[in-house]
Amino acid sequence: MGWVYAFPVIVLSGMMLGALGLLLSVHVRQLENFAGTMNFVIFPMFFLSPALYPLWKLEESGATAIHLIAQWNPFTHAVEAIRFALYGQLASRSVVIVLVCLAAFFFLAVRGYDPQRGFSKRGGKPD
């Protein structure tokens, strides 16, 4: 039954990470650099989240700096929301943070989008 609760949270988390990807793609000028940029963003977000090690264990083990960074990590709240949803519980704080990050990333991506970037200055033809 946990999958029924977790599915909307997984979709919401995916949309947040997709909006983050859009935000980064707006500022990356070459397609070849996008994969490297995503790796420099996604991997630290993943490793500084409770995806591999529970957040409360970080605090308990004395890793206070990592625990503090993990609390500000949007990926942390996506993982926590999914984890709680699988147990049939609602982590409302995490869901709200994921929603706010989704809205902020998407808004910033839309603001930074330049439709003329793909056109050359000579004749308006695509590059």
Image (cartoon, rainbow, N blue to C red):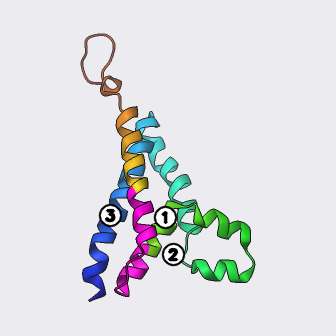
Residue 100 on image: x %, y %: 41, 55
For disc 1, the marked residue is 75
Residue 82 falls inside the magenta stretch: yes
Q: Secondary structure at mark 2?
A: loop
Q: Earlier in the sequence, mark 3 or mark 1?
A: 3
Residues packed near mark 1 inside 10 Å, few (<14), some (14 to 19) or many (20 plus): many
| Front residue (pair 15, 85) | 85
Residues packed near mark 3 inside 10 Å, few (<14), some (14 to 19) or many (20 plus): some
Residue 35 on image: x %, y %: 46, 50
Q: Are marks 2 and 1 in contact (CB under 8 Å)?
A: yes
Q: Earlier in the sequence, mark 2 or mark 3?
A: 3
**Please, what is the three-letter code of the amino acid marked with disc 1?**
Phe
Image quadrant holding the C terminus, namely: top left
* Left or right of residue 9, residue 70 in this image: right
| Front residue (pair 116, 126) | 116
**Label 2 to label 1: alpha-carbon separation:** 9 Å
Task: Check the image and name the residue furthest to the front.
Answer: 92
Does 77 appear above or below 59?
above
Q: Secondary structure at mark 1?
A: helix
**Label 3 to label 1: alpha-carbon separation:** 12 Å
Q: Residue at x 50, y 58 (%)?
A: 42
Q: Which portion, as a residue range, is magenta?
A: 81-99
For disc 3, the marked residue is 12
Residue 21 in sight? no
Image quadrant holding the N terminus, namely: bottom left
For disc 2, the marked residue is 51
**Label 2 to label 3: alpha-carbon separation:** 17 Å
Residue 118 in sight? yes
**Please, what is the three-letter code of the amino acid marked with disc 2?**
Ala
Q: Residue at x 33, y 70 (%)?
A: 10
Which of pointers 2 and 3 indicates the residue nearer the eye? Answer: 3
